[in-house]
Image: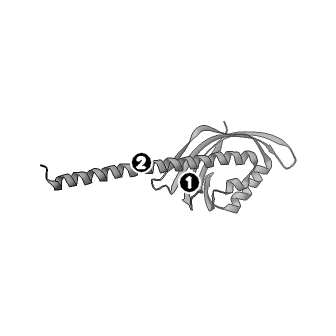
């Protein structure tokens, strides 16, 4: 008959191993859910461009956002972001804001931080102050960093680049 201490230690080891595997699976499921939530924000952002919905864009923007572009690091308030998109939407009528590549999304193992890289074709007709219209067609790529606060994903930083097709 096996030593009861040996059997107990093996049983305990098995329980710990199964519990660890189950927790790892739950984390993976939680991360997959968080990644789906961030992809949903990307879809909302696309809709907001076509609808000129600045409020929808601001719903997931931190009070201060780090904006990296053109060799500069800018601290932008939510009001700065609002003003930028109001001016942009006022002069732009979108015909495309479409993924060129599927977005790349990653979420930390604790589910509190995430990032997304997107590459989209952006086409719109721009109306200048005198009413003249110019067609714009470019490719934009950016990486957005997010924190989950009170159950909501909030963008805290964005690094972007834009160029021709």
Q: Judge from the rendering whether residue 124 lies leftward or rightward of residue 43; answer left or right.
A: right
Where does the image place residue 36, in percent across and percent down from the top left?
Answer: 55, 46
Q: Judge from the rendering whether residue 134 lies leftward or rightward of residue 64; answer left or right.
A: right
Q: Are marks 2 and 1 in contact (CB under 8 Å)?
A: no
Q: Could you tell me which residue is drawn at 62 percent across and 59 percent down?
A: 65
In the rendered image, the vertical position of residue 150 relative to residue 54, given as above or below: below
Where does the image place residue 104, in percent across and percent down from the top left?
Answer: 54, 43
Which structural element holds mark 2? helix
Where does the image place residue 80, in percent across and percent down from the top left?
Answer: 70, 60
Q: Could you tell me which residue is drawn at 70 percent across and 45 percent down?
A: 47
Q: CA distance from mark 2 to mark 1?
A: 25 Å
Q: Which residue is mark 2?
A: 25
Front residue of 138/21: it is: 21
Q: Which mark is residue 16?
A: none
Front residue of 24/95: it is: 24
Where does the image place residue 51, in percent across and percent down from the top left?
Answer: 75, 47
Viewer-nearest of discs 2 and 1 = 2
Which structural element holds mark 1? strand
Q: Which residue is mark 1?
A: 145
Q: Judge from the rendering whether residue 79 lies leftward or rightward of residue 16; answer left or right.
A: right
């Amino acid at each position: 008959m096996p030593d009861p201490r040996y059997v107990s230690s093996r049983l305990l080891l098995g329980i710990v191993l199964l519990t660890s595997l189950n927790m790892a699976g739950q984390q993976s499921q939680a991360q997959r859910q968080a990644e789906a939530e961030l992809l949903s924000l990307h879809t909302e952002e696309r809709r907001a461009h076509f609808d000129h919905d600045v409020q929808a864009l601001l719903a997931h923007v931190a009070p201060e956002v780090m904006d990296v572009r053109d060799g500069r690091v800018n601290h932008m308030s939510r009001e700065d972001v609002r003003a930028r998109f109001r001016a942009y939407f006022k002069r732009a009528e979108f015909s495309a804001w479409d993924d060129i590549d599927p977005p790349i999304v990653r979420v930390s193992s604790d589910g509190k931080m995430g990032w997304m890289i997107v590459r989209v074709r952006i086409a719109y007709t721009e109306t200048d102050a005198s009413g003249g219209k110019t067609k714009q067609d470019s490719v934009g790529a950016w990486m957005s960093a997010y924190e989950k606060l009170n159950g909501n994903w909030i963008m805290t930083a964005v690094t972007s680049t834009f160029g021709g097709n």
